[in-house]
Image: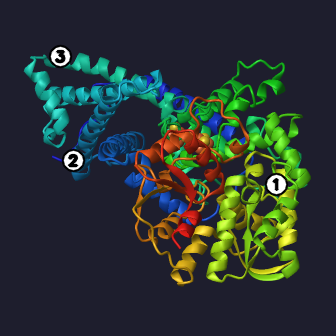
Amino acid sequence: MEATRQLYWNIGEKGLMYLFALLALAIFIIGIVKKIKRWKQGRPIVYDNLGLRFKSFFSAIVKHDLEVFRGTFRRYMHLSVFYGFTVLTFGTLVIAIQDHFGIALFYGNKYLVLSLLMDLFGLMALIGIGMATYKRYIDKPDHEDYTFDDALLLVLVFAILFTGFILEGLRIYATDDPWSLWSPVGLFFSTVIKYFGFSIKAALSFHSFLWYFHMLLTFGFIAYIPYSKLFHMFASPLNIFLRSYSPIGGITLIDAPSTDLINIGVTRLEEFSQKQLLEIDACISCGRCQKGCPAYISGAPLSPKVVLHSLKRHSITKNSVFRRKENDITNDLILDKVITKETLFSCTTCGLCEDKCPIYIEHIKRIVDVRRGLLSVDAGYPAEIQKVFKNISEVGNPWVQRLDAKYYLTEESKIPILSKIKETEVLYWVGCYGSYEARNRKVSKVMFKIFEKAGVNFVIMGSEEKCCGNSVRRLGNEKLFQQLALENINNLNRYKFTTIVTSCPHCFNSLKNEYPQFGGHYQVLHHSEFILELIKAGKIKPKGVKNLKVTFHDPCYLGRYNSIYNAPRDVLNSIPGLELVEMKNNQSKGFCCGAGGGRIWMEDIQEHTISSLLVKKAQRTESDILASACSLCLTTLSEAVSDIDSDLSSQDIAEILYDAL
Ligand code: SF4
Ligand code: SF4
């Protein structure tokens, strides 16, 4: 006798099943189509490199090698449910195909192997659900992200799997199935049923009732998927497939020079890109972005996760059939109604949220796009920011400092100006902070001395160097950024030089990564890289220091944005007698100083500033110096250090090195 079993045993008429199946499928498809329509309202996206995309997509799905699954418990929990349901769905499809098309798939060895696999993988899924329940309600019962939807889904999936096994047990018991050893879990349930003395008649009646209940649960579950958190099973992989492969912190690029700058931002949902609308549905609410966000931790009114959730709620209301038609346009506006200005301008664009998001959601693009939307609203920007924009556009720096402040710097140090020399080896890009801000001017002067000591032929641009526009761009003023970029590029392109060296990672990021879009192609080095080259070439030799303990803060725009982690550490490690101690979270997980994204020009309203939180982390290392390699970090950290009762000082790596020469 060939191994098989009767499909839809003890069911009789299947009409009701088809009706519910069609209904569930229709509700499911309507839900999916609605989502896709919502995404398609956005700006079209371009994506290339399909080979790489497919490779990392399959690796993420098949191997579950995503960051979110680090730690074996979470990974095996998700793998069990994922593969459990994949095999069960495959088995159910085989049964449906045989039943409808008469193709004999469920026979002989194929039947035995598939029966065994469905049983074992079903059990695996059940164990996975148990693990998820443990994680949620026993291990971390107070987690703020758990919703009713989470609990409902767990109960629903458990009920589907459990009733499925009971049905199998009842069938094996009532039919005395000769192949039952190939369905070990079903056999176990059949033994239990027998143990409790069920009569065959009772087993048949209960099976018939339970089968309809199981069917309703399963179809209800399928219909519910697009409307529940479970929709992430489609949206998250799609988001991983469409992820950006550029470094963290990328922003939406605007054609240069844009002719339509006034309409480049986002004021309504449909002005986001299709990918950004997909992200709203792809978020799995894991909360990692929020947990890592320095603004959120400091008590500022910003959580990247909540921003996404608010946009999701807005998108559901906006697309609801019950939505009132009047005042639609006003109701559609995102700013103030969905994201408040306080939230919008709390972001430092540090990129920690993007580093932590397991499915590569890009938060900074969204924040900057909505900030850009303010360009079309009169007096939309906070007053202090409007003042900074005015100063920069009138005199080229944020503080209305007279341009000859740079000449003062030059005269005092006798530094040649590029416009007079015309040709040089190194152009030192001083930056607004290095030129005008007292603490950073000391670093500029130290850099001049290091250049002189190493015999480097260098100049500065003097008044021809305008603000690089990095923070202006992050604040959303693309128009002013492009003006600054074009003016700087125009000035730079008139001269000959080999390398631009700068101490500020914000200037570094603009010059290296953003000016090429506008025709400015230069070799740009951060001062940590250049100093390291000088040390390696033997042009400067640190003599050493006496028992100096230093901890290094990775500036966001140097580390996360440009992956420069080793150069500043190598410079510090080249100093004999200096002990470099790492903070608990460093490199790509390093905290933020609170100054990026234009925050340096805004007042902190929260109780703890981000810089003070960073200083506390540095204090735990018991270091003498909190080192950084960024003009903005040095500004905020020097202030924060002066507010605490401690011997800890804040210094740039160039200052530490110069003291050791
Ligand atoms: S970029 Fe930084 S401050 Fe902004 S939302 Fe992300 S983690 Fe928070
Ligand atoms: S945005 Fe990413 S990190 Fe944040 S909750 Fe969603 S999935 Fe998690």
Q: Which colour scheme is used?
A: rainbow
538 in relation to 294, above or below: below
Q: Mark 2 points at which residue?
A: 112
Please name which of the two marks, 2 or 1, marks the residue nearer to the observer.
1
Q: In this view, does 639 lie to the left or right of 385?
A: left
Secondary element under disc 1, as helix, strand or loop, is helix
Point out the frontmost of discs 1 and 3: 1
Which residue matches tag 3?
Answer: 201
Circles 1 and 3: CB atoms closer than 8 Å: no
Q: What residue type is labelled 2?
A: Leu
35 and 523: which is toward the camera: 523
Q: Is residue 215 visible?
A: no
Give 270 or 643, whichever is nearer the viewer: 643
Give the residue type at disc 1: Phe
The residue positioned 39% from the left and 51% from the top of the image is 64
Residue depicted at x 87% and y 59%: 403
Check disc 3: other Cα within 10 Å, few if <14, some if 14-19, many if 20+.
few
Q: Distance between the residues labelled 2 and 3?
A: 27 Å
Residue 19 place in picture, x, y as percent = 49, 25
**Of callouts 1 and 3, the N-terminal one:** 3
Q: In this view, does 436 lie to the left or right of 218?
A: right
**Residue that numbered label 1 is attached to:** 481
